[in-house]
Amino acid sequence: MSEPVPSEHVSGFALDPMHQFKVTSLIKIPFGTINADFTNASLWMVIGVVFVLVVMLAGPRKLVPGRLQSVAEMAYEFVANMLRDTVGDAGRPFFPFIFTLFAFIMAMNLQAMLPGSFAVTSHVIVTFALALVVFVGATVVGFVKHGARYLRLFVPSGVPIVLLPMLAVIEVISYFTRPISLSIRLFANMMAGHTMLKVFGGFVVGLGLLAGWVPLAVTVAVFALEVLVAFLQAYVFCVLACIYLNDAIHMHDH
Amino acid sequence: MKVREGGRKSDLSERPGPFAERLERARCSASKRARRGYVAGSAYELGLRVATEMVVAIAVGFVAGWYLDQWFGTKPLLIIAFAILGASAGVLNVMRTASLSVSAPKEGGEADTKPASKGNDDKPCDLPDNGD
């Protein structure tokens, strides 16, 4: 890594920090006009799901947990507490969904930190699909629980009748920003972090043995930050999903 | 770990409290502390969140206005109105985001001033914990 590299190679490496996000087909699957190929993104999703399954299901269940079982129990407790704190007991039926969401995003974010892996959550379509499931799900739950009265979410109380139409429109817009801000936040954090790592990694190679240590130190620090961000973004995504669920179940909050 | 437990011992003897209270304190474990860490650790994150909310709301208003304009054939009017309404929705979202984290900033501020003393700022919340 610290050996002198021909300069044209250096510039090619340093100038393409976005190459890591390229989706390539591994197995072509003919499916009409729809592109249903098995891509590197799909591959890493499968790897992540298998990893979660191994952590959650493998190993004997002992009274005194081993390492793997501790991780599984901690993850369970963490999500259960999060759901109970934000939604309360009414949120219990949604635990499997929130846990799956958390485990999936967490696995995707963390495995993206492995060199050579693929950051699935740095693609806005993936995060948007997840956010859309949360959004549509919460809306459906709201309508099932409250019927047409759920629309009163858009009617703020104690407002002069003149201002009401305008405020209702503002509330509707605010409601529809939810899935978009949810997905943009996760995707932007992941993409920014990985791009930054790649750029600094390019600096290390470019500056070589002489001054490459400085960006190398920065890379190590950014890497640590990215591991934190990987956890935080999974957490934030699920907390916001819980909050939206809470709004749908107990709609008197605002 | 040892030091922290020693420090907490006096704390414990100060206020023994009924069992239910201690149980409640014991219960708010991982998630609360994680949230506190989240709020304390990343003002940057909160800033980014607020900025996203604002920008996204304006964009949603803009796009909604664009399509409604095409639908009703009122070319420039609705896009202007909805961009403004979107900005208002953005302010609303920012206020909500801020009020969501209102319960935590108190501890967050404390933790900011003395980041090293972790045992200090979550005094009410981690009595019999397995530490971290």
Image: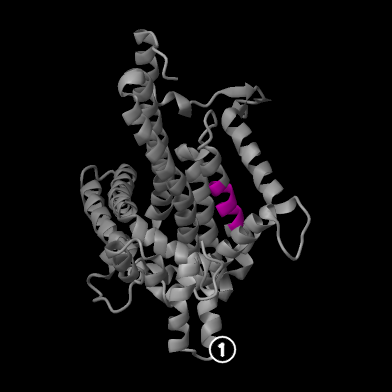
Q: Nearer the viewer, residue A159 or A52?
A: A52
Measured from the top left, where is residue A71 in percent x and y?
63, 55
At a point 38% along the width and 8% down the height, the residue shown is A6
Residue A196 appears in the picture as rendered: no
At a point 52% along the width and 37% down the height, the residue shown is A112
Scheme by which the image is coloured: one colour
Left or right: A99, with A245 as reference point: right
Residue A254: say if magenta.
Answer: no
Left or right: A190, with B57 as reference point: right
Q: How crowded is mark 1: few (under 14 residues within 10 Å), some or many (20 or more)?
A: few
Q: Give the range drawn in magenta.
A: A99-106
Measured from the top left, where is residue A157 in percent x and y?
32, 77
Measured from the top left, where is residue A103 in percent x and y?
59, 51
Question: Is A17 rendered above or below residue A182?
Answer: above
Residue A102: say if magenta.
Answer: yes
SS under mark 1: helix
Question: Is A8 rendered above or below residue A220?
Answer: above
Question: Is A48 rendered above or below residue A157?
Answer: above
Amino acid found under the numbered disc labelled 1: Phe
Q: How many marks?
A: 1
Q: Name the residue under label 1.
A: B19
Measured from the top left, where is residue A92 in percent x and y?
61, 69
Left or right: A108, with A226 as reference point: right
Q: In which quarter of the image is residue A208?
A: top left
Q: Which of A119 and A243 is in front in this view?
A: A119
Q: Nearer the viewer, residue A235 or A169?
A: A235
Kindly identify which chain the residue marked by label 1 belongs to. Answer: B
